C-alpha cells in the first residue's frame, strides 16, 4: 500500500491536465480520502489510457486491476473500474467507465496494457461486459455452457436440494448422472 503522502498530492495537476487535454472525455472527477476517480466516456477510454501511460509526467505504466460493478436498477447500470499505478512516481489513479444495456460494451485496453487480457476476461465472465476488440474474449472462470453472468444483480440463483439420509433416494433421482 502506498502512503498517502507519496503521490496523492501530485495527482491534482494530472487531473487538471486531463481536464484540459480531454475536456469532452471526462464526465466526472471525485476525490475521496486522497484517492482520485476519473469517470471517462467509453469511446475515449483507450486514447486517455494511452496518454496516461505515455506522458512522462504521468507514467501510469502498470494496470493493477480491472473490475466490474452492477448498479442495478440504476442507469447506466454497469461500471468498469481501471486501477492504474505509476511505479516511477509511486501514485495511483482510478478510471471508471459507466455503460448501459443488457449487453454492455467497452473498448478493450489490451493494446495499452497487455495484462488487461485476463482482467477483462474475468469481468466479461462474471458481469457480461463485452470488451470490443479484445484478442480472446471468452469465459475464464466458468464453463463455456454456463448461462448468464453470476455477479449481475438480476442473475437468478440455482437452488439444489441438499442430500441427506432422510431424502437420499428422492434427491438421487434428480441427479443427471447415468443410472443402471
Image: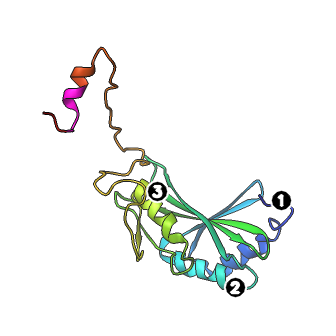
Of mark 2 and mark 1, the one earlier in the sequence is: 1
Q: Local crowd at mark 3 within 10 Å, few (<14), some, or many (≥20)? A: many
Residue 78 — which label? 3
In the image, residue 176 lies in the stretch drawn in magenta: yes
Is the residue under label 1 in contact with that under label 3 (CB below 8 Å)?
A: no
Image-based side of 141 in relation to 113, left or right? left
Task: Report the magenta residues as a range.
Answer: 172-177
Residue sitting at x 53%, y 78%: 46
Mark whose residue sits in front, 2 or 1 = 1
Query: What residue is at 32 percent from the left and 37 percent from the top?
Result: 158
According to the picture, the residue beneath numbered tag 2 turns out to be 55
Residue 117 in magenta? no
Figure check: 61 above or below 160: below
Residue 10, horizontal then vertical, whole percent: 81, 71
Residue 41: tell me if it is visible.
Answer: no
Distance CA(mark 2)–CA(mark 1)? 23 Å
Dot 1 lies on which element? loop
Question: Residue extending furthest top?
Answer: 166
Which residue corresponds to mark 1?
3
- Residue at the farthest right position: 5
Judge the density around disc 1: few (<14), some (14-19), many (≥20) Cα neighbours within 10 Å: few
Amino acid at each position: 500500500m502506498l502512503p498517502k503522502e507519496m503521490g496523492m498530492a501530485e495527482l491534482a495537476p494530472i487531473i487538471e491536465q486531463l481536464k484540459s487535454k480531454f475536456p469532452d472525455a471526462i464526465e466526472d472527477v471525485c476525490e475521496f480520502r486522497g484517492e482520485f476517480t476519473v469517470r471517462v466516456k467509453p469511446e475515449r477510454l483507450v486514447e486517455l489510457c494511452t496518454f496516461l501511460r505515455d506522458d512522462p509526467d504521468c507514467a501510469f505504466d502498470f494496470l493493477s486491476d480491472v473490475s466490474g460493478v452492477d448498479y442495478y436498477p440504476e442507469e447506466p447500470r454497469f461500471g468498469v473500474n481501471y486501477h492504474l499505478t505509476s511505479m516511477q512516481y509511486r501514485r495511483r489513479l482510478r478510471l471508471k467507465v459507466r455503460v448501459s444495456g443488457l449487453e454492455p460494451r467497452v473498448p478493450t485496453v489490451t493494446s495499452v496494457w497487455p495484462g488487461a487480457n485476463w482482467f477483462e476476461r474475468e469481468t466479461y465472465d462474471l458481469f457480461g461486459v463485452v470488451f470490443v476488440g479484445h484478442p480472446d474474449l471468452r469465459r475464464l472462470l466458468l464453463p463455456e455452457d454456463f448461462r448468464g453472468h453470476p455477479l449481475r444483480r438480476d442473475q437468478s440463483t440455482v437452488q439444489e436440494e441438499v442430500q441427506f439420509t432422510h431424502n437420499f433416494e428422492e434427491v438421487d433421482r434428480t441427479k443427471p448422472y447415468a443410472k443402471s
